[in-house]
Image (spheres, coloured by chain):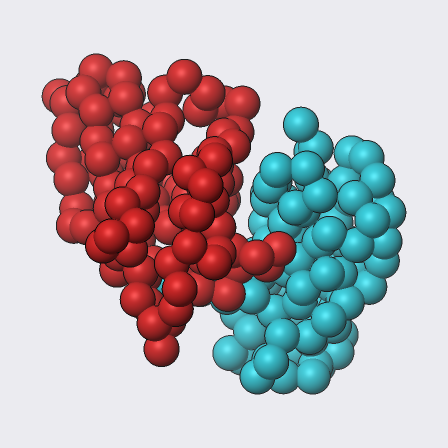
Chain colours: A red, B cyan
Amino acid sequence: QVQLVQSGAEVKKPGASVKVSCKASGYTFTSYDINWVRQATGQGLEWMGWMNPNSGNTGYAQKFQGRVTMTRNTSISTAYMELSSLRSEDTAVYYCARTLGATRYWGQGTLVTVSS
Amino acid sequence: DIQMTQSPSSLSASVGDRVTITCQASQDISNYLNWYQQKPGKAPKLLIYDASNLETGVPSRFSGSGSGTDFTFTISSLQPEDIATYYCQQYDNLVTFGPGTKVDIK
């Protein structure tokens, strides 16, 4: 069965960076895009960007341009999302998701807390 | 960027009621529109893809329609387990989610 397993919760100080991993199993990793979506407590879903694991091509939401980097390691079927220059407003649950048009599979979410 | 609006932002209805949520895109997105249900503490769940296609395993009381800029999501007979927040999502040009509609039981 398809599974996306994300890394554990993180606590970071303002100005630091965080790197969240998403390990895929149960399908061919390079056949589907990986999207990243975040959700602050009590807020809506916010799309951050996508990555094609086959080519490494990426596309980022304008809001995160310059601050987010999405990469992958195909040998271990793992996608990564790194967000830099963290501020308190980046405190949220971050989800990876397997996408082909629609998103049918999601990771369990990773809570990133930014606090001094 | 394509902007998505949803209305209402919240609603309260009785069990068995028909519930309708609308979603509007800031430009023509054809039928590149999905609907998700999210319950507290859980990842979103795909209900409708490509505007009107019911995802496998999703009850038939859920439906979607529309194309271009205007879309509608309907629950034909609200059930207690439908309490959740519903989001539309366009994927014609990158991805944008609507702000969500919170559905409660009256």
Give the quadrant of residue B4.
top right
Q: Position of residue B105 (x, y in %)?
A: 57, 71
Residue at 43% across / 47% down in the picture? Answer: A54
Q: Position of residue A51 (x, y in %)?
A: 45, 41
Residue at 34% across / 72% down in the picture? Answer: A26
Give the quadrant of residue A85.
top left
Residue at 36% across / 49% down in the picture? Answer: A95
Q: Evaluate whether residue B40 shows in this view.
A: no
Q: Residue B75 or B97: which is nearer the viewer? A: B97
Task: State left or right for residue A45 relative to residue B17.
Answer: left
Q: Evaluate whether residue A114 shows in this view.
A: yes
Compared with residue B25, is residue A104 higher up or lower down, i.e. above or below?
Answer: below
- Quarter holding the N terminus of chain B is top right
- Quarter holding the C terminus of chain B is bottom right
Q: Position of residue B81 (x, y in %)?
A: 51, 78
Compared with residue A108, is residue A3 higher up or lower down, i.e. above or below?
Answer: below
Compared with residue B8, is residue A16 higher up or lower down, i.e. above or below?
Answer: above
Q: Residue A97 or B82: which is nearer the viewer? A: A97
In this figure, what is the number of numbered marks? Answer: 0
Q: Residue A104 or B18: which is nearer the viewer? A: A104
Q: Position of residue B80 (x, y in %)?
A: 54, 79
Residue at 22% across / 54% down in the picture? Answer: A76
